[in-house]
Amino acid sequence: MRRSMMVLALAVVAAAPLAAQSSIGHSVDLALSYREGSHTMSMSWHAQVGLANRRVWLGAGLRSSAMLTHTRDFELIDGGGSPQQQIADPRVQTLNLMVTGDVMVTRRFGAGLNLDLIGGSHGGTRGGGLQQFRPDRLNLFKGGSSDEGSLNSEFYVRYNVDGRTAIRLGATHYVMGYEDRNGPSRYNRFITAAFVGLRVGF
């Protein structure tokens, strides 16, 4: 974690001279996804710096995501519980810090991605057999199946309707994280789904 923070700090310092000579844009986003009874709805704000004649945009922001799905099997990530645990009707609300990146191929068409890094979750207690589970309070990107809590990410193509509005289509890859209320066991469920998004700049 300390090494990651040092790398991030160095990247910010290195980018500062470029940012001073570049455009800064702010945007709000609304995105919806669906796959076989699993839904997400997310709202976000982010600021991006335009580089390379405003063809590359890098930035960061905040995203709130509501994640819903039917009763599912979750995989054990940490602790000494059962390798799999069925959790009834998971519902998680998150607020996370995210990083973003977009590349414009033409004035109208581009591609991009974003990724939640750290934040928090809340939601009601859910049953799993004789046990009770609640969303992990801390969300932390660790890479691969070791992610902690509930995190969202998107990979997409975009079409600029005009100078302020863009439509995004792609795939969202998110994880829902739960913990045993009476023990140290943590469980994750990863889901990939198609999404559509609307972005408005200001």
Image (cartoon, rainbow, N blue to C red):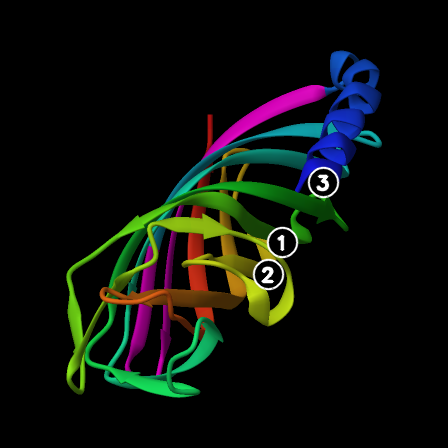
**What segment is highlighted magenta in the picture?**
23-41
Amino acid, disc 3: Ser
Instruction: State the residue at coordinates (69%, 36%).
Output: 2
Left or right: where does residue 200 sit relative to residue 112? left
Confirm or deny contact between disc 1 and disc 2 (CB under 8 A): yes
Determine whether 192 is above or below 176 in the image.
below
Amino acid, disc 2: Tyr
State which tag comes first along the sequence, 1 or 2. Answer: 1
Q: What element carries label 3?
A: helix
**In terms of depth relative to the viewer, which is nearer, 173 or 155?**
173
How many discs appear? 3
Instruction: State the residue at coordinates (31%, 70%).
Output: 39
Instruction: State the residue at coordinates (78%, 35%).
Output: 7
Residue indicated by mark 2: 156
Quadrant where the N terminus sits is top right
How far apart marks 3 and 1 lie (CA) works out to 20 Å
Amino acid, disc 1: Leu
Q: Which of marks 2 and 3 is in front?
A: 3
x and y percent of residue 184 in the render? 37, 65
Instruction: State the residue at coordinates (44%, 51%).
Output: 139
State which tag comes first along the sequence, 3 or 1. Answer: 3
Residue 37 showing in the rendered view:
yes
**In terms of depth relative to the viewer, which is nearer, 60 or 56?**
60
Residue 10 included in the magenta stretch of the image: no
Q: What element carries label 2?
A: strand
Residue 4, labelled with which disc? Answer: 3
Left or right: where does residue 1 sit relative to residue 17? left
Q: What element carries label 1?
A: strand
Residue 34 included in the magenta stretch of the image: yes
Residue indicated by mark 1: 113
